[in-house]
Amino acid sequence: MLDKYPLHDVLKSNGTALGLILNMASAPLVEIASLMSFDFVMIDAEHGPISPADAEPMIRVAELCRIAPIVRVASCRPDDALRYLDLGAVGIMFPHIKTALDAREAVAAVRFPPLGKRGVAGSTNAAGYGVRMPFSQYLQRANDLLLPILIVEEPEAVENIESILLVEGLAAVVIGAMDLCAAMGFPGDPSNPAVEAAVDRVIMLCRVARMPVCLAASDLETSKKHLRRGANMLIAPIGSWLVGTGRAFTSAVRTAAP
């Protein structure tokens, strides 16, 4: 059954939401993320081997631990989103959104009619297998609580961000700085002044529109920088985060060892 998560309250109050990117199939990592007080996990079905079958136990653990399960899908096709939504994902991150039309189609893929075009099925985990609440109530609740999230990662999206933000039903915008810098001709250089200016433009317009805006940050200094810029959602990639933290630990211990 679809319930409100603490993440919903954080976003509504314009607070700071913290998420962990999981690009490996592991339900225990979802539980660990909840114990670390993350607000959501981003289950990465774009840059990793995670399939719907892999995601299902991760989503179920997220439901039990009350940490919001959000899935980054591999494309903007509605059928990609539907399979994870029916499993119980509370949000979908759509990559490579370039225009307001792309944004409207993404929102429609998440919302049930009359607000969208999502296919209706009662025999799913998301719907409580049709017995946990009246089905009409489930449809309304899903339309109220599901989170369509867009990833801005190309110059065209930056140019169109004002019209994109006018699309009704958007829950948040993620800035994919690494893809954006590559698309702008500065691969591997998100600190390039032109890229930073593009990122700042998106953040500024999101803040004006009171739209939550998210950036990736795997260390404290980068996180502080993004928060100063105006981001109010941060996602940490578990791989680089664990490697950085683990290396610092092993290095410190070996230095202190007699």
Image (tube, rainbow, N blue to C red):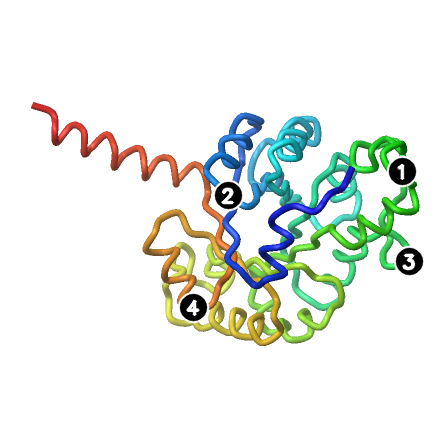
Which label belongs to residue 107? none
User: Which label's residue is closer to the chain start, 4 or 1?
Assistant: 1
Disc 4 designates what residue? 229
Disc 3 from disc 2: Cα separation: 33 Å
Mark 1 or 2, closer to the camera: 2
Amino acid at dot 4: Arg
Mark 2, other Cα within 10 Å: few <14 / some 14–19 / many ≥20: some
User: Which label's residue is closer to the chain start, 3 or 4?
Assistant: 3
Instruction: Classify residue 125 by image quadrant.
Output: top right
| Labelled pair 4, 1 in contact (Cβ < 8 Å) | no
In what quadrant of the picture does the C terminus appear? top left
Disc 2 designates what residue? 38
- Residue sitting nearer the eye, 141 or 223: 141
Q: In the image, is 117 to the left or to the right of 241?
A: right
Amino acid at dot 2: Phe
Disc 3 from disc 4: Cα separation: 37 Å
| Labelled pair 1, 2 in contact (Cβ < 8 Å) | no
Which label belongs to residue 121? 1
User: Which label's residue is closer to the chain start, 1 or 3?
Assistant: 3
User: Which label's residue is closer to the chain start, 3 or 2?
Assistant: 2
| Labelled pair 4, 2 in contact (Cβ < 8 Å) | no
